[in-house]
Image (tube, rainbow, N blue to C red):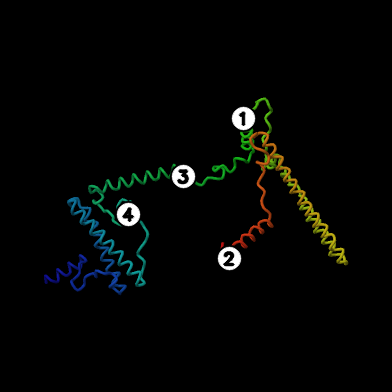
Amino acid sequence: MLYRFREAQAAELGLGTRADRRPKMASACKSLRECERWRGEILRELSRKVSKIQDAGLTDYEVRDVNDEINKLMREKRHWENQIIALGGANYRRNVAMLDDDGKEVPGTKGYKYFGRAKDLPGVRELFQSKKKEEEEENQALAFYKKFMNQGPGYFGDLDEADGKLLEYEHQAEEEEWRDEYTNIREILNLPLDDPIPKMPRGPSAHSSPLPSNGHSPPQPPVTSKRKAQEEDTEMDTVNVESTAPEQAKRPRKVGADGAAKSNVIQSNGDADSIRAHASAAATYLGFLSPEDLMPPTLPTREELEGVLLALRKQALVEEYFGE
């Protein structure tokens, strides 16, 4: 009679008999019904432990032990839920925050939770207060730097030249710096300062603003003589295709090619003259340099390079077969 009473009491408490105890490994149970049963038993034990940890008569050591047992049961419950999912059962795992009686999330770090009086243990409250303080500092830093995030092109200065004021200011600053440097160079070279200051040399792109204020399109670059010669060549080719005499078709092409070659020579001569003029103008301000010193170096032609490479190859062959 006493044995039956103990067995019924153990079954009521969820302890079970020796032959009917919960397996230590959830993966050892292959029955979905048994997994559901053991999960329900763990939930009942969790309910009793959470009620027990609220007892004010427990010492701090007992509260820590009960809190450890609750976390152990939580891990075991998670193993049984994984086994139920593996056997094709319901998915009890939900990504929902665990709440206490006050509706607040149960505090904890790295999976370890604190229930009931465990939240008031010495050292635990300070831990959560320091963590809360760190989160507040991070939120303040994020709120401070949030105003610098997701900015438009105006924040990075891409629209500074849209109204043309910045370009005008830079132009004036360049003129002032040019006058100051010119005066300094005249003083260094012991030249008279009464001479008028020449204008600052600028390229063709400096006179045409990239963003004209009058709304008109910028001036197109002039068509070079080479381009004109090519257009004439193509026009004459189309005329010659329509004509029937092949001999007459060859003459305009030859004339066009000769015109293109002549225009290239004229253009190269014009470039050389402009370069020499710039060198002469610069040499007037630098008395210790001649215009020839300021000229760009002359590059060898293709025939000269081929001749040098051929001579080096011949010399290498002679040294290989006949020696030095």
Q: Is mark 1 on a helix, strand or loop?
A: loop
Mark 2 or 1: the one toward you: 2
Q: Do the residues labelled 2 and 1 touch (CB within 8 Å)?
A: no
Drawn side of residue 60 relative to residue 95, left or right: left
Q: Nearer the viewer, mark 1 or mark 3?
A: 1
Q: Earlier in the sequence, mark 3 or mark 4?
A: 4
Q: Which of marks 2 and 3 is nearer the N terminus?
A: 3
Q: Which mark is residue 99?
A: 4
- The secondary structure type at the circle numbered 2 is helix
State the CA–CA distance, disc 4 to disc 1: 86 Å
Q: What is the crowding at mark 3: few (fewer than 14 residues within 10 Å), some, or many (at least 20)?
A: few
Nearest the viewer among 123 and 213 is 213
Type of amino acid at the residue the image marks with label 4: Leu
Q: Is mark 3 on a helix, strand or loop?
A: helix
Three-letter residue code for mark 3: Lys
The C terminus: image quadrant: bottom right
The residue that disc 3 covers is 146
The disc placed on residue 322 is: 2
Query: Which of the two residues, 238 or 37, is positioned nearer the viewer here?
Result: 238
Q: Residues within 10 Å of mark 2 (few under 14, many from 20)?
A: few
Q: Earlier in the sequence, mark 4 or mark 1?
A: 4
- At x 73%, y 47%, the residue is 221
Q: Disc 1 to disc 3, how far (Cα)?
A: 57 Å
Q: Which of marks 2 and 1 is nearer the N terminus?
A: 1
Mark 2 vs mark 3, CA separation in Å: 79 Å
Choose the circle earlier in sequence order: 2 or 4.
Answer: 4
Q: Are dots 2 and 3 in contact, CB under 8 Å?
A: no
Amino acid at circle 1: Leu
Q: Which mark is residue 189?
A: 1
Name which of mark 1 and mark 3 comes first in the sequence: 3
Q: In which quarter of the image is residue 305?
A: bottom right
